[in-house]
Image (tube, helix red, strand yellow):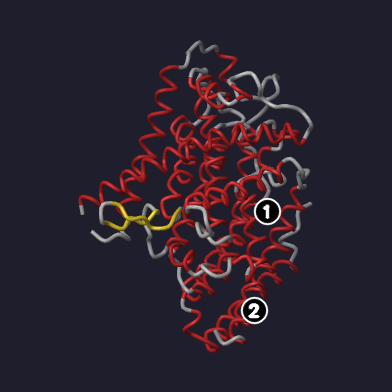
Amino acid sequence: MAENSFLPILIILILAIVFAFATVGLSAFLGKNTYEKGKLKPYECGVEPVGNPHIRFDIKFYLIAIFFLLFDIEALFLFPWAAVFIKLGLFGFVEMFLFIVILLLGLIYIWKKGALEWD
Amino acid sequence: MIFWLISTIIKIIVVFGIILLAAAYLTLLERKIAARIQNRLGPMEAGFHGLLQPIADGIKLFFKEDIIPAEANKALFILAPIIAVIPALVTFSVIPFGAPVKILGHIVPLQITDVNIGILFILALTSLGVYGVVVGGWASNSKYALLGGLRTAAQMISYEISLALSIIGVIMIAGSLSLANIVSAQSHIWFIVFQPAGFLIYLIASTAEMNRVPFDLGEAEGELVAGFHTEYSSMKFAFYFIGEYAQIVVNSAIITTLFLGGWQGPFLPSVIWFIIKVFAVILVYLWFRWTYPRLRYDELMHFGWKFLLPLALANIIVTGFVMILLGK
């Protein structure tokens, strides 16, 4: 068994999962259960809840999610490159410079399109 | 083999216990520091200077009524705080917290496991934190919770890009994704000297990633009551806090490892140095919270996308350029 294996991570993951479920379960078991209907309504500052809680929300959140997907994947490409950067030398730098410039152009494009504006 | 297994399990149990204890006592530390900054005393009643306060809070939350709203999605509602807390507890497993020690003729590294993609592992786990928030906000079936969950999700994914990019410079200099190698690469000079911009971007982006003031838009008390955990009570409520405070400890440990030389330092034992540095970074996080007012949501998004992201990309280019110039 190598010292650098993922086995300890599995052990700590199982420990964390067991701890989390046991604590929540125990607390639900120990806590008092004097439910009355009013308490189980969604909180709206003490007045009766109005309308459907799953309201429609701004399309901007969806756009942000798409930008995240694009930029985070492109950021991920940089990790293997950075790890071997010293060996790649000038060639690797120029390659990645072009890559980052393209990334920046994309950012400037969505910026100019007004996709990052919130009002 | 047997020795490796036993030493690993002992390390896991000790680290796990310390993270939980640290998360609990950070609540006290935060209240004490808040009090000092605002010129008052903070918790004083439970134990000497309030030292038993976290334990009292824990016991109280254990016995509290466990309310699940009638219209909530029950399974997701219970699962969300658990999802929020698990990544925070597991992340520490790849962080080296001391120099290797020799026990019974075996060399034991003071790190639970040194995987060769340690940084990617950390980034993967910290980004899982967003699920706890967005699932909790959605499952609560409450307007405040939904709005808070959405806002926080958009904020966390926006700052995560800068967070990931700010580390690239460190990896370029160290030439490795393993945290043990990154620490040993800093034996002469800490990486904060080569990567001051990377350090600042990581510090700011991680504050936003943890939803702490001045980036706590998702739980802005003034407008959203408590944001995504409005409907939560009892231990599930506490779990969001354990997750947040464990995340502070973990992020401070990551900053220490990546930028502040890890466990290395003169005279004192390595573990003591590690604790001192982590504690210093924790204090900076707490200091932020009680110094800055909350940003507006559009300011927050502009700052993340239009300032931090280009800065992080520029940092990578400048780092690469200087390294080529110096012929490293």
Between the residue at mark 2 and the residue at mark 1, the CA separation in whole angstroms equals: 25 Å
Residue B312 place in picture, x, y as percent? 65, 67
In the figure, B14 relative to A35: above or below?
below
Q: Where is mark 1, residue-wise?
A: A60
Q: Amino acid at mark 2?
A: Val
The nearer-to-camera label among 2 and 1 is 2
- Residue B258 tag number: none
Per the image, label 2 sits on a secondary structure element best described as helix
Task: First in sequence, mark 2 or 1: give its number.
Answer: 1
Quadrant assignment, res A46: top right
Task: Report the chain holding disc 2.
Answer: A
Work out whether residue B70 can be spotted. no
Q: Amino acid at mark 1?
A: Lys
**In-front residue for pair B228/A19:** A19
Residue B121 place in picture, x, y as percent? 44, 58
**In-front residue for pair B58/A57:** B58
